[in-house]
Image (spheres, rainbow, N blue to C red):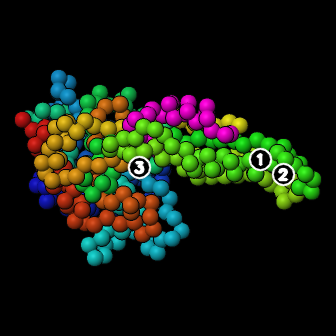
Amino acid sequence: MSVQELTNDAIVLLKQLIETPSFSSEEDETASHIEAWFKRHEIDYTRTQNNVWALNKHFDESKPTLLLNSHHDTVKPNTAYTKDPHKAIVEDGKLYGLGSNDAGGCLVSLIATFTYFYNHSDLKYNLVLVASAEEESSGPNGLNSMLKIIPNIDVAIVGEPTLMNLAVAEKGLVVFDAKVKGTASHAAHPNNDNPIYKTIEALQWFRDVKFEKGSETLGDVKLTVTQINAGKQHNVVPADVDLVIDVRVNDSYTNAEIAEFLQKTAPCSSIIPRSLHLNSSSIPVDHPLVQAGIEMGRTMYGSPTLSDQAWLSCPSLKLGPGDSTRSHSADEYIYISEIEEGIKIYVELLNSVIVQ
């Protein structure tokens, strides 16, 4: 099929995905739509739980392997929607609907690109496509669960909305649960160990703390207190205050180093990381994929947002149609032209790198 025919089919598939609810761990029906694409295009595929994946027809174990990955789960719609989040609405060149931008447009564009190259016998790289589940929740049955099932990956393109610019690095994430302890008491009596007042010092420390090592592509480590909880009755001073801290980690630190620093220095009774697995990721700027993108006029940058790249130990490039600032917003949309451009750029990029 031509690129134009595949593009038309991809837009139809995206509309189907939008109109099929697929919250994280509830992607059964969207997985079935993706299966239908592979059947219709006569592509051998496998479904593992709600992950749908395929290898190029002439897969050769002696060649390096390039992963094409994006996800078909979504967050739940927020209350500010004015349009039906599960209805694919086209207005003024925009395709509205939950998951249209994050990351349905990327996914269908990568599926179309994989389909374009599926029958090629002259590739320098094998291709593996994974339409993955549970990305939004970093769940146990998403891309992370597939890495022990699919062939070993040498490099990856992860489809997330980047305006088709080259996100050559991505910040990691560590979420911490912290506790400030004090002395519980009746509110009517003196108490010099009120944990709520002690939390003021902790909040100021988290606001002002600086990490010495910056990054050329990812900037500084960013630490943000995002939740605070304490007390159940108006007349009782609580025994402790719970805080949640979101830390976006650049490529100058490992998540473990961030955890060690905070546990030694933060003015809290305890501070515990929920997970240390979501590290920063990157690809060398001299990699052929990056160099080919630069030659096509695409811009390099470092991404502050997390994706399934965090599970990968190989070099990985984040690249996809759509705009990250629209993700998780009310009345989410992607331009039809962005999908058309995205597939064209994906195909051109791979033509210059993986075709003999």
Q: Earlier in the sequence, mark 1 or mark 2?
A: 1
- Position of residue 240 in the picture relative to residue 285 (left or right): right
Is residue 303 placed above or below 122 in the rendered structure?
below
Residue count near mark 3 (Cα–Cα under 10 Å), binned few <14, some 14–19, many ≥20: few
Residue 305: x %, y % from top left: 41, 49
The residue identified by callout 2 is 237
Residue 297 seen from this side: yes
**Mark number for residue 290?**
none
**Mark number for residue 195?**
1
Three-letter residue code for mark 1: Pro
Give the Cα separation between the discs numbered 2 and 3: 38 Å
Q: Residue at x 24, y 62 (%)?
A: 338
* Mark 2 secondary-structure assignment: strand
Give the Cα separation between the discs numbered 1 and 2: 8 Å
Where residue 55 sits, quadrant-wise, is top left
Q: Depth-wise, is mark 2 or mark 3 nearer the camera?
A: 2
Residue count near mark 2 (Cα–Cα under 10 Å), binned few <14, some 14–19, many ≥20: many
**Mark number for residue 305?**
3
Count of picture labels: 3
The residue range painted magenta reads: 247-268
Residue 318: x %, y % from top left: 30, 46
Q: Nearer the viewer, residue 224 or 177?
A: 224
Q: Residue at x 11, y 35 (%)?
A: 123
Placement of the C terminus among the 4 image quadrants = top left
